[in-house]
Amino acid sequence: GPEGLQRVIQRRAPIYDKGQDGHYNLISALHKSIRGSDPDAALYYLARMFDAGEDPLYLGRRLVRMAVEDIGLADPQALVVANAAKDAYDYLGSPEGELAFAQATVYLATAPKSNAVYTAFKAATAAAKEFGSLLPPKHILNAPTKLMKQEDYGAGYRYDHDEPDAFSG
């Protein structure tokens, strides 16, 4: 009857405005749930986004981004898991591929977190822009020509692997 139809209509119309606030609110909630190590909340927001028809490629990209931005070298396997989930989804499609994203989501949420590479690269990028095209120090440059050798390219370079503890610094 009409009540059953009303339930179906309400069920099939999740509040989600792709490309608008609803979309960005849910991806933010998913990202922050993973960053905050809350797998239950992360799965809930992932499921809501799938239910609303979010582009799986977008979700896959975001999971990869979270792996490198929020987990990084605290668990390098996180990037492998996120990429594997994206590949599994590409191979399986929906709905089976959604489980690969769910697995990656739980992995990322429960992984140790570090944004050290993210912040270090951000600082290096800022330094590169600020200081421009500084030449590398001559002692770490190759000297393939006689002129370069005369100009002291490579002079004083110590090959790390030949040093005690394989470190010349």
Image (cartoon, grey):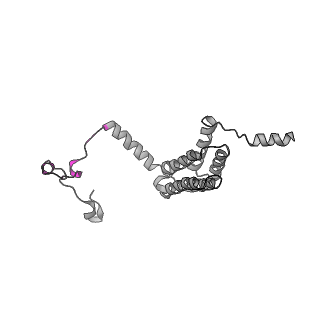
Q: Which residue is drawn at 21% across and 55% down?
A: 157
Q: Which residue is drawn at 29% across and 63% down?
A: 166
Percent position of residue 39, x then y: 62, 53
Query: Does residue 20 lie above or below 52 as drawn?
Result: above
Query: Does residue 148 lie above or below 2 as drawn?
Result: below
Image position of 83 (left or right of 147): right
Image position of 80 (left or right of 129): right
Percent position of residue 45, x then y: 64, 46
Image position of 46 (left or right of 118): right
Image label count = 0
The magenta segment: 131-151
Residue 135 within the magenta-colored segment of the rendering: yes
Percent position of residue 80, x then y: 50, 57
In terms of depth relative to the viewer, which is nearer, 151 or 162?
A: 151
Percent position of residue 151, x then y: 14, 47
In terms of depth relative to the viewer, which is nearer, 136 or 86?
A: 86
Q: Which residue is drawn at 69% across and 38% down?
A: 15
Q: Tell me the quarter of the image containing the N terminus.
A: top right
Q: Which residue lies furthest to the top in this view?
A: 20
- Evaluate whether residue 126 shows in this view: yes
Q: Residue at x 49, y 48 (%)?
A: 69
In terms of depth relative to the viewer, which is nearer, 169 or 110?
A: 110
Q: Tell me the quarter of the image containing the C terminus.
A: bottom left
Image position of 157 (left or right of 123): left
Residue 62 within the magenta-colored segment of the rendering: no
- Evaluate whether residue 112 shows in this view: no
